[in-house]
Image (cartoon, rainbow, N blue to C red):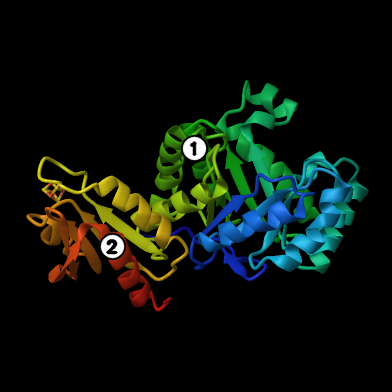
């Protein structure tokens, strides 16, 4: 897949843009002031493979809490700020690796200059996050609504403010809850700028609509070579966002990270509780970053054959199952031992047990 050539920026230890792999990020939904809860959620996100985490900075206390939070986690933290330049300054002092703030909404020029100076001194990139739901009124009037052109112009207005201050360490997002509008905005923007893009469909909804909208929207753009980092938005545990993010990238061959599970939909030949086995295996294998294809098949008739591409798998039988590797049968396993056997074999392959 040919990817659009964007300029590279660095967010903590993660490269974004250029030839860097498309990264997966998420956002905490804890109160940032609750350091323990926030750190614990970030650790769970890390374990799921999350590479960048954003936290809401709503007041001075949350900005100050970031100091401790940043020191206790292993992935770069981005401070999400609306309007208040002081919170941006405090967050940079607290050690965040990135800021999400729209310079056009900060107010007086000197305030923007202060934020840019602080970000520049510490090599902290700024994400300009255009959201169709909060577009500037003049652009809404000019375009008679929050259309893609208005979103792109909004991004360009914010970028101009930063570039006039010689600040180029930026990335951009152009999110709407409508998939076609989101895709159109990103397409338009990518024709006029090489700034790296953070992809997402905002307020995508609960699990099913959220996964579908994000997969279709983000997937369409990635398939066209657009996008350098992604965030799936779900009204759920953010760990789910990371899982979906990697599934999108894996399905397009853009990342190989982690376990790739192949499972059959079951049919009348299936005599095991495949859905439950699958659920247990998925839970047990979260956090493994080695790219291993695991198959969970309902019967031995088609199981090994259908999963020939898999590194390892199990095919259910009557009261027992068959363990196979690379499509070849290895041994029989009792039904109640299937999960344990498969998980321990996968962990051995991954070198984590
Ligand atoms: Fe049916 Fe077996 Fe195919 Fe699963 S693997 S769908 S149980 S034939």
Nearest the eye: 150 or 96: 96
Residue under the image location 82 percent in, 50 percent down: 62
Name the residue carrying label 2: 294
| Marking on residue 213 | none
Can residue 75 be seen? yes
Residue under the image location 47 percent in, 58 percent down: 4
How far across and how far down the image is residue 39, in percent?
69, 58
How far across and how far down the image is residue 269, in percent?
10, 45
Asked whether the residues under the numbered discs 1 and 2 touch, taking CB atoms below 8 Å apart as contact, a structural biologist would say no
Q: CA distance from mark 1 to mark 2?
A: 36 Å
Crowd rating for badge 2 (residues with CA inside 10 Å; few <14, some 14–19, many 20+): many
Quadrant holding the C terminus: bottom left
Can residue 310 be seen? no
Q: Dot 1 lies on which element?
A: helix
Residue 202 lies left or right of residue 91; in this view the side is left
Residue under the image location 20 percent in, 62 percent down: 334
Depicted 301 relative to depicted 353: above or below:
above
Q: Earlier in the sequence, mark 1 or mark 2?
A: 1
Crowd rating for badge 1 (residues with CA inside 10 Å; few <14, some 14–19, many 20+): some
Q: Dot 2 lies on which element?
A: strand
Name the residue carrying label 1: 184
């Amino acid at each position: 897949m040919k990817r659009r050539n964007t300029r590279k920026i660095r967010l903590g230890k993660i490269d974004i843009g250029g030839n860097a792999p498309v990264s997966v990020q998420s956002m905490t939904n804890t109160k940032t002031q609750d350091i323990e809860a926030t750190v614990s959620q970030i650790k769970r996100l890390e374990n799921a493979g999350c590479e960048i985490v954003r936290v809401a900075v709503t007041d001075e206390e949350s900005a100050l809490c970031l100091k401790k939070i940043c020191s206790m986690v292993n992935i770069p933290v981005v401070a999400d700020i609306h309007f208040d330049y002081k919170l941006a300054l405090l967050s940079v002092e607290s050690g965040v690796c990135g800021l999400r703030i729209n310079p056009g909404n900060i107010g007086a020029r000197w305030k923007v200059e202060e934020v840019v100076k602080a970000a520049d001194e510490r090599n902290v990139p700024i994400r300009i996050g255009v959201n169709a739901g909060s577009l500037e009124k003049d652009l809404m009037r000019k375009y008679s609504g929050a259309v893609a052109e208005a979103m792109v112009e909004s991004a360009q207005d914010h970028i101009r403010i930063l570039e006039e201050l010689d600040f180029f360490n930026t990335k951009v997002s152009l999110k709407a809850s409508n998939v076609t509008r989101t895709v159109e905005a990103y397409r338009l923007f990518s024709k006029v700028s090489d700034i790296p893009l953070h992809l997402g469909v905002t307020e995508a909804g609960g699990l099913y609509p959220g996964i579908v909208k994000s997969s279709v929207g983000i997937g369409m753009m990635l398939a066209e070579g657009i996008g350098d980092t992604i965030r799936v938005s779900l009204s759920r545990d953010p760990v789910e966002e990371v899982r979906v993010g990697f599934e999108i990238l894996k399905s397009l061959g853009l990342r190989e990270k982690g376990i790739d599970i192949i499972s059959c939909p079951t049919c009348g030949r299936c005599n095991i509780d495949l859905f439950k086995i699958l659920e247990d295996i998925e839970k047990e294998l979260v956090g493994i970053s080695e790219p291993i294809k695991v198959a969970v098949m309902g019967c031995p008739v088609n199981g090994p054959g259908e999963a020939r591409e898999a590194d390892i798998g199990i095919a259910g039988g009557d009261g027992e199952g068959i363990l196979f590797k690379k499509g070849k049968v290895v041994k029989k396993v009792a039904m109640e031992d299937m999960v344990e056997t498969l998980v321990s074999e996968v962990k051995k392959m991954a070198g984590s047990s």
